Image (cartoon, rainbow, N blue to C red):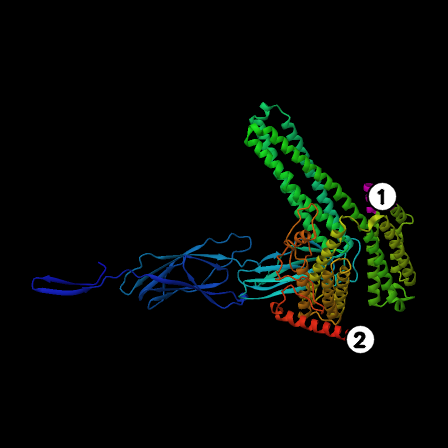
Amino acid sequence: MSVQTNVSVRAGDFIKSMRIRPLFRPELLRLQAHIVWPDYLQRPASTEILSNGRLALLYGARVSFAGRANRALGSAAWTNGAAAALPVTNESFRSPALVLTEPAAGAEPAPARTLTFVWTDTYRLRCAAPYRLELSGRPDEPPALQCEGLAGAVAVLPDEVVELRVAAKDDYGLQRVWLDWWLERERDAAVASLPSNVTTRLLAAGAPDCLATNAACRIAPLAWGVPEGVTIALCAQALDYLPGRAPATSAVFRVYVLGRAEHAKLLQEQARNLLARLDDLAREEERLLLANAELAAQPPEKLQSEKAASELRENEQGERANARQLEQLAAELDKLTREGLRNTEIDNATLRDWQKNSSQMRQIAAQPMARAAQALAGAQADPQERQPQTDRAAQQEAQALEQMRAMQRSAQAALDQMAARNFVNRLRDAAKKQNEIAGALQHDLPATAGLPADRLPAPERGRLAAAGTEQERNRRATQAVHDDLAGFYTLTRKEAYEEVRQAMSAPDVAGEMRELGATIAKNMGGQAIGEAQRLQGKLNAWADQLEKAGGGGGGGSGEQQQIEADVLLGLMRARVRQESLREQTRAAGEIKAGSLPHATLSAALGALQGEVTANTRKLAEKTKFPQVAQGVEQLAGMMEAVEGRFREGATDSGNIALQTAVIETLAGMVQPSSGATGSAEPSAQELAAMLTAKRPGGNTAGGTTDRENARFGGNAAGAADGRRRVRQSGGNDAGALPAEYRDVLQEFFSATEAEAALRGAGVKP
């Protein structure tokens, strides 16, 4: 019976009528847990509705349970080890609070306990089944850290910026997340002018209810006051609210701050490694060629056997694997070329050679290797065509092998040229360091002359120690050049390099530089200055000698193609360096501890901008196209405006906006056009396509810090009318640019037009 009904009972003359109302057993509509958290969490009490019969409770938290039935209750009880009645109010009941105690250190956690709830309504109907809740304890786990955007070890130039993204999460609240960084000094020489303590930078301030944070930190050697030759070690840390707990710590990341000559040498080693892998691949291709030639020479009955078909299948798979590996080498060579764009000491001829080889690798993989694999597949499918198809495969493999060997010879020559150029750059770099040391000593000479080193004032004594440290580092760098010259001469047998090596040995220049370090340590300033200048002259003379012997560049073919490719590569370099400067500008506003004084940093950024501007202006003289030359000149004018802001000490959003406009203009000018030539040597347009494909955004430093680039719309041809006005990559409509960009650009255009008007009137602005 499920509906109400009236019932009459008759017994003789007695009649009794009654109404029967059937009822279901009382049901539990909701069971919720009221949790009071431990005091150290600083969290307010919370309520959690239980729906799956399980509750994992933090050790030390107090929990009570409240249930609500679908009608008024007469009684309720629970079993928590022993049965006990629960207080009832209308349709609700509530349990007393209980606490799960954390097991002692090293002890096994207690098994989950089962709480059983039963209830009876005012009609004395009992619940159909008790509600069972599995209650378990859980510890307060330490925070979890995830770091992205930076490899475990990366190399950057001093004026570059890399970014580390840090995500932290905790089960019961993060207190704070921060970055610790310190300097790892060279094994046998301390950098006396740098702080040795750990510097802390707060990334995110947490809160009791903050369970996850995401933050990023720009690592900027220039803004942090870190010179080349020093390693920045850093790690992220996160702390929750558990008293006495040590912070969670990420792996240690290392950022090697390299000079341009050191960076060029690193790229040279990577190029040599790629060349060795190309040689291994050529040997494998030669093995396949011999195997297929032997198969093709077999009698028809053997060639049509199942064994021959199996060998052909293996050879086809090997050919396809070779093609994939060659395409992978091409991709790595493209990446190496993009790395080379960062360094002005990697000349354009080397970059063109690398891109030419990359293009040839793809061409070999797509044509003779692919045709050879296709012929081998055809030979397997048709035994009657096996002989001619195997012959065809061998011919294609011979063509691929010939092209790979020719490419090896070309690449080796380019690598030798790069190594030769690197010797020139390293010697000039050592000479520059000697000049800087002499300048630093000259600056302090009036205050330090005649004083013993141990009686110098603390600032001068620190600078003297720093000069000695730099001298020792320069000595070891010069010694490395001497040692590398011996190996290079063994490989190339070029006499000029052996002559320079011998000149560096007698007298021993490294010994002279060591003696200079001792002179500096004794504060014999006048003598040290003269000796440093003498060494500077010797190092420059050796660099000149090697440059005349053929270490100053070269390579490539096709006069007009060279010139326009040089312009394109120059614009790409400018874009990479401008992106780096923009990131440095942003970092200047973020980094405080350990950074340079703002005026010093702004002046340093202005000097770097001036270098980029000067190099960009030179490109106008290299192009044969007046429209391109005019666009480059106007671009250099925008860069001069950025430089002026740096000189004024401005590292604000307006400067960043103007730099972004410069970068957009550069992006439009190097935008690859359609119409690839299909030639083995890439055109300027193909160079642009290869070098801008999948480029990291923000900056290109750090090698493996690949991040998707922020896209900017439109094309900037770089051309303009007779007035000094630049077409932006956002299009001709200025409204397409963000408001802050339009304001800065309008200010720039107004200033330059006013300057042009004054000059036209014969007035000096």
Quarter holding the N terminus is bottom left
Q: Which residues are magenta?
A: 483-498
Q: CA distance from mark 2 to mark 1?
A: 58 Å
Residue 286 is situated, as x and y percent measured from the top left of the image, at 68, 34
Residue toward you, 532 or 718: 718
One can see residue 256 in this view: no
Residue 159 is situated, as x and y percent measured from the top left of the image, at 73, 60
Q: Residue furthest left?
A: 13
Residue 661 lies within the magenta run: no
Circle 1 packing at 10 Å, graded few (<14), some (14-19), many (20+), is few
Vertical comparison of 704 with 716: above or below = above
One can see residue 570 in this view: yes
Q: Closer to us: mark 2 or mark 1?
A: 2
The quadrant where residue 735 appears: bottom right
The residue labelled by disc 2 is 762
Residue toward you, 371 or 439: 371
Residue 485 lies within the magenta run: yes
The quadrant where residue 211 appears: bottom right
